[in-house]
Amino acid sequence: DSKHLYTVVVLGASGDLATKKTFPALFGLYKNKYLSQKTHIIGYARTKMNQATFEGHVSKHIKLKSEGDKAALQQFLRLCSYQSGQYDQDNDFQILEKHIEDLERNSGATARLFYMALPPSVFINVAANLKKNNYREGIKIRLIVEKPFGKDLESSRKLAKDLGALFSENEVYRIDHYLGKEMVKNLMILRFANVIFGSVWNRHSIDNVQITFKEKIGTEGRGGYFDEFGIIRDVMQNHILQILTLVAMEPPVSLDAEDVRDEKVKVLRFIPPIVKENILLGQYIKSEDGKEPGYLDDKTVPKGSKTPTYAAATLFIENERWSGVPFVLKCGKALDQQKTEIRIQFKDVAGNLFSNLSRNEIVIRVQPNEAVYVKMMNKEPGLGTKTIISDLDLSYSSRFIDIAIPEAYESLILDALNGDHSNFVRDDELIAAWKIFTPILQFIDQGKIDPIPYPYGSRGPKGVSEFVAKHGYTRGQQE
Ligand code: BG6
């Protein structure tokens, strides 16, 4: 499958996602020779642009680190072309078809990758037009789609059904870009290729699991989009739940995409819907120094909105491995730092041989500064037998000095080109994920929970520490 030569069509090519993520990732793949010199890339969107403007747009967020990069970009831009068109006009997709066919004649491409970087409102229109006008027997089709995949169980089911009527599940690649992150891809190896981790990865040894996502920035101009979704739909129900799934799933039979995804669906189905006692919501207000605006100061946010920009939620997995172990998920915008990490906290050591012990923890830092470290007790060096908490620390920046960590989008686009679905979200997985969150989201959407205000740049709403402590997490020595 990987031998196919592609024509790549980016739909929504003038948007934020395409400029910030898709084009830089395609360039990264091209530069590192993962894309053939003959791969044509077509941008399609409503905005009228000439070739020069489009090239400016493609290059806008591409970082050039050397003279070699500059030369590669010039070559890359020669493969890029643009066509403006409406999303609901048959005729425009026929023109697109002619454009693709002209390029295919020249390149000999045998496959097409349609990358849908589009708002949900035009999504099905575009898919239908592609199916009708740009689908050719004998030419391999791959369709990358981006969230939001619906807003709740019902809308997600409808979207899956409408898309399923046009393209087979095998042709669809649903992106959750967290699945392309280096440390997220590392989770299965850490768990299933290490006896020392694998054998303690259960409720007998683990007390609780914390998964945290923090961002320093607020909604900054994206308030209009964000307000309809909120932090749970924007980050927790997808990115953070995907991490949880990989932390908690059983070992798959093989690394085949369907075997991996079967296990992911299975573990999600063991999670009952979140109850309101196990959720805490926040919304940011002006920073303490008054310099940064509050969420409601964003002009695109409706007055009096109760949309959460922070959420903490506790989930339980009711199976043999995890029953009784709280998984505490915390996500927030406009906080004191940017960080995504997984913290697995172990139980207390039995007996009372030593005093002043902290619990063991395995911490997997997804970003920034990828690392895995284990918090462990050690003898404080010197005379006496005092205990001290220490780290076994694998920091990527010092251990893998010459290895550049690829961007998530590069990794995922490459997987899609190779026909590998392992790191994409399957339709039944999505349904299982929505089942966990839909009841609480409906309750929140009815305005039944007032988010707790927290200042921009702070550690989050008051009460988070208590919320976390209630579910078992204890702070260690010197913390
Ligand atoms: C996106 C969300 O999916 O993920 C954004 O819509 C969020 O709100 C982003 O900022 C975080 O991604 P990353 O890769 O910057 O951690």
Image (spheres, rainbow, N blue to C red):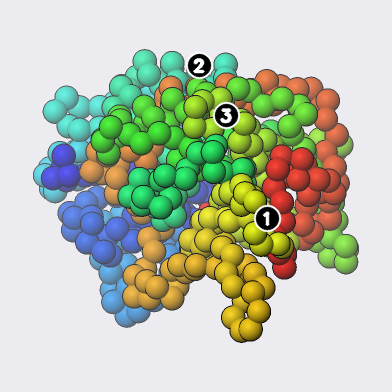
The residue depicted at 36 percent of the width and 15 percent of the height is 165
Marker disc for residue 352? 1
- Report the Cα–Cα distance between label 3 and label 2: 32 Å
The quadrant holding residue 36 is: bottom left
In the image, residue 164 sits, relative to residue 237, either above or below, namely above
Asked if marks 3 and 1 touch (Cβ < 8 Å), the reply is no
Which residue does the numbered mark 2 point to in the structure image? 158
Q: How far apart are the alpha carbons under marks 2 and 1?
A: 57 Å
- Residue at 64 percent across and 37 percent down: it is 326
In front here: 205 or 257? 205
Residue at point 72% right, 68% down?
478
Q: In this view of the protein, which residue sits in the foreground, 123 or 35?
A: 35
Marking on residue 149: none
Q: Earlier in the sequence, mark 3 or mark 1?
A: 3
SS category of the residue bearing label 2: helix
Considering only vertical position in the picture, is 418 above or below 316? below
Closer to the eye: label 2 or 1: 1
| Circle nearer the N terminus (3, 2) | 2
Q: Amino acid at mark 3?
A: Ser
Image quarter in which the C terminus is found: bottom right
How many badges with numbers are in the image? 3
Q: Can residue 423 be seen in this snapshot?
A: yes
Q: Is residue 205 left or right of residue 475?
A: left
- The residue tagged 3 is 323
Marks 3 and 1, how far apart at CA:
27 Å
CA neighbours of label 3 inside 10 A, class few (<14), some (14 to 19), many (20+): some
